[in-house]
Amino acid sequence: MPASVALREKIYRAYMEFFDSAERKRRWNPFSDIPWEKLDPSRNDEDKAVCAETFCGVELYVPDYTANGFNLTREVFGHAWFQANWGYEESKHALVFREYLTRSGMRTLEQYLAFEKAILAKVWNLPFHTRRQMTCYGALQEAATYLIYKVQRERARESGDGLLEAIYFYISRDEAAHMGFYRDVLVLELEEDREGTLADLAHVLAHFRMPGVGLVPEYEKRMETGGVGITSQQFLEFGIFPTLRKLGTSRIELARARAAAQAGKRPFDARASALA
Amino acid sequence: MTTDSSLNDDMFTLLLEAMKAEGHDTTIALESVSMDDTLSAIGIDSVRAIEIAAYIEGKLGVSFPDDQLARSRSVRDLVELLVRYGRHAA
């Protein structure tokens, strides 16, 4: 269903706020803002490397994320322009992880390039096929990603690793901003069509998977490394429930929306259901 | 009068009923679920926990606080939550 003129205008304004804030408060340079002089090889350890490499792998799908995202959002100016800004910011994340892995010596350039080649041998495809469902996905996925990076930042701070703390500070701040934009857009979508948006959110939740699943080599094994993921309970407490509160809904209403959709009162987009 | 022990049993049974109603009997053998299992070990992730809680809340006419639901790590934690909030409904 195409977005109404009123909704497109509201999303434009939400993007303007996001962009203005990003330009004034959140821009950072991977070379001059990261304290590379604090790089200390004695702090190297394989868990840190696996974490950074795994995050880098997920961020390396920026070409697929943006190509798919642009096609889905191109008719809604604010959302499409957000996609462009989002892609720029995520591209820096991959870049800074690559620099960290190779500058620290935890990965040689050859090892990094082999990893990159393995990543790009696979293609990321949209897990959902409408703009609104992908907005739901974005709100949840960015929340999880923010939490993961926040945990990493706290670990780095506790261990006195100033370099890694700075990296995760900048990246987690970006992810929090992305999460905020998706949540803001979902609030607007709810104003436009509450029942349909909740049905979409319930559908996305029921089929939610992080983007690296099935793509990043040895993903399951990597998940065994401390801090590379978050627990289901953490996602529930710090990701899902705060999202529902921000949207002014509850898991009870969400469950009702899902039940109604499953009962056929409000069928999901047929293509999305078939492919999910 | 309902004893604590029988209430525990009732709530454990209700939990299994909810898991079956939400389709978990297709992925795990419910008869093998025990109080000591962690939720992750029996495939109850964050989304499944929401579904199961919604089913039980509907049955009991109660509402569990989000934070307590989120902090449930095991079947025992969930059953204790059900007992705590389902005591007056039982």
Image: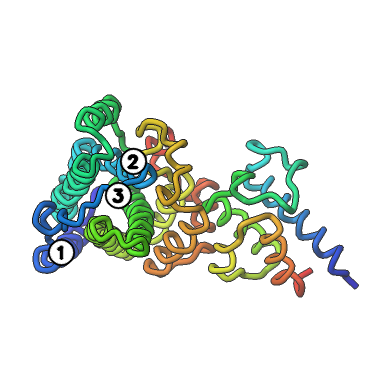
Whichever of labels 3 and 2 marks the residue nearer the N terminus, that label is 3
- Residue located at (86% from left, 63% from top): B6
Position of A227 compared to A67: left or right?
right
State which quadrant residue B24 falls in: top right
Three-letter code, disc 1: Arg
Whichever of labels 1 and 2 marks the residue nearer the N terminus, that label is 1
Dot 1: element? helix
Give the numbered dot on residue A26: 1
Percent position of residue A245, x then y = 42, 69
For mark 3, what is the residue?
A42
Q: Contact, CB < 8 Å: mark 1 with mark 3?
A: no
Spatial CA span between label 3 and label 2? 21 Å
Give the numbered dot on residue A194: none
Three-letter code, disc 3: Ser
Is A256 in front, or is A22? A22
Three-letter code, disc 2: Thr
Is B90 in front, or is A256? B90
Give the numbered dot on residue A54: 2
Q: Residues within 10 Å of mark 2 (few under 14, many from 20)?
A: many
